[in-house]
């Protein structure tokens, strides 16, 4: 809508880019500018993390954290599929080294299932070795839906998407150009 105020998003990490994208999806044609001090997107934490797309196994059953983790993971996988970004689905193996830890894993299994992670399963020492030959334990919880992605590639794809939707970066249509404090203060 043309009467909406222009928006400046500070930071071209995953959060800033996602905010800019959502603004443009909700209000096509809105003036959105992303300001980034670096010469590329995801130059800091967004580009230096483990890349894990968490399954939500650790969150309390039914919590907003669990719900958002599952929903966000599904949306991220869909975005990656649409953008041609590979998602590696190696899963996660949580290993117990003693009986007390094994009991905690059984509790985690119930929590995982309550959170909709139906493929999670307990396994013994042989199952552990089948998945990870270098791991040893008395039991493990296998969560096959945990995956990983290159979040720098995700950020670059979001940046390209918001450019197509009309976003600008700094004072030009190129990420990395920094709007000065004087320019930014006039927004």
Image (spheres, rainbow, N blue to C red):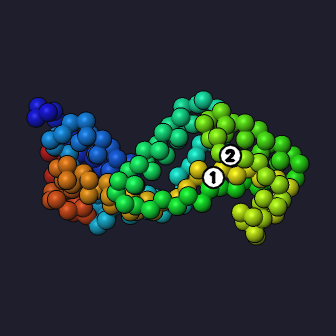
Residue 133 sits above or below residue 167 on the image: below
- In the rendering, which numbered label is found on residue 120? 2
Q: Position of residue 88 (x, y in %)?
A: 52, 61
- In the rendering, which numbered label is found on residue 144? 1
Q: Position of residue 52 (x, y in %)?
A: 54, 56
Q: Position of residue 25 (x, y in %)?
A: 25, 40
Residue located 53% across and 34% down the image? 67
Rendered image quadrant of residue 113: top right
Residue 68 sits above or below residue 121 on the image: above
Taking the image as shown, residue 83 lies to the left or right of residue 73, namely: left
Residue 184 sits above or below residue 149 on the image: above
| Pick the front one: 73 or 58 | 73
Density class for disc 1 (Cα within 10 Å; few <14, some 14-19, many ≥20) is: some
Q: Position of residue 82 (x, y in %)?
A: 35, 53
Give how far apart the Cα atoms at labels 1 and 2 are: 7 Å
Asked if the residues shown at circle 1 and circle 2 are in contact, with their CB atoms under 8 angstroms apart, the answer is yes
Taking the image as shown, residue 40 lies to the left or right of residue 44, namely: left
Residue located 77% across and 48% down the image? 122
**Circle 1 sits in a helix, a strand or a loop, which is it?**
loop
Rendered image quadrant of residue 125: bottom right
């Amino acid at each position: 809508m043309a009467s909406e105020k222009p928006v400046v998003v500070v930071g071209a990490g995953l959060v800033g880019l996602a905010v800019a994208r959502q603004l443009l999806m909700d209000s096509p044609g809105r003036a959105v500018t992303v300001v980034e001090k670096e010469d590329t997107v995801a130059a800091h934490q967004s580009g230096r993390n483990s890349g894990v797309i968490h399954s939500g196994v650790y969150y309390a059953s039914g919590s907003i954290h669990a719900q958002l983790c599952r929903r966000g993971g599904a949306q991220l996988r869909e975005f990656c599929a649409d953008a041609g970004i590979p998602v590696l689905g190696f899963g996660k193996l949580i290993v117990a080294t003693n009986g007390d830890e094994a009991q905690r894993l059984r509790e985690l299994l119930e929590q995982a299932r309550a959170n909709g992670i139906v493929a999670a399963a307990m396994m013994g020492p042989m199952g552990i070795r089948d998945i990870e030959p270098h791991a040893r334990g008395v039991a493990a919880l296998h969560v096959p839906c945990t995956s990983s992605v290159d979040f720098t590639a995700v950020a670059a794809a979001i940046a390209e998407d918001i450019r197509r939707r009309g976003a600008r970066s700094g004072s030009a249509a190129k990420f990395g150009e920094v709007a000065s404090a004087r320019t930014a203060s006039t927004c």
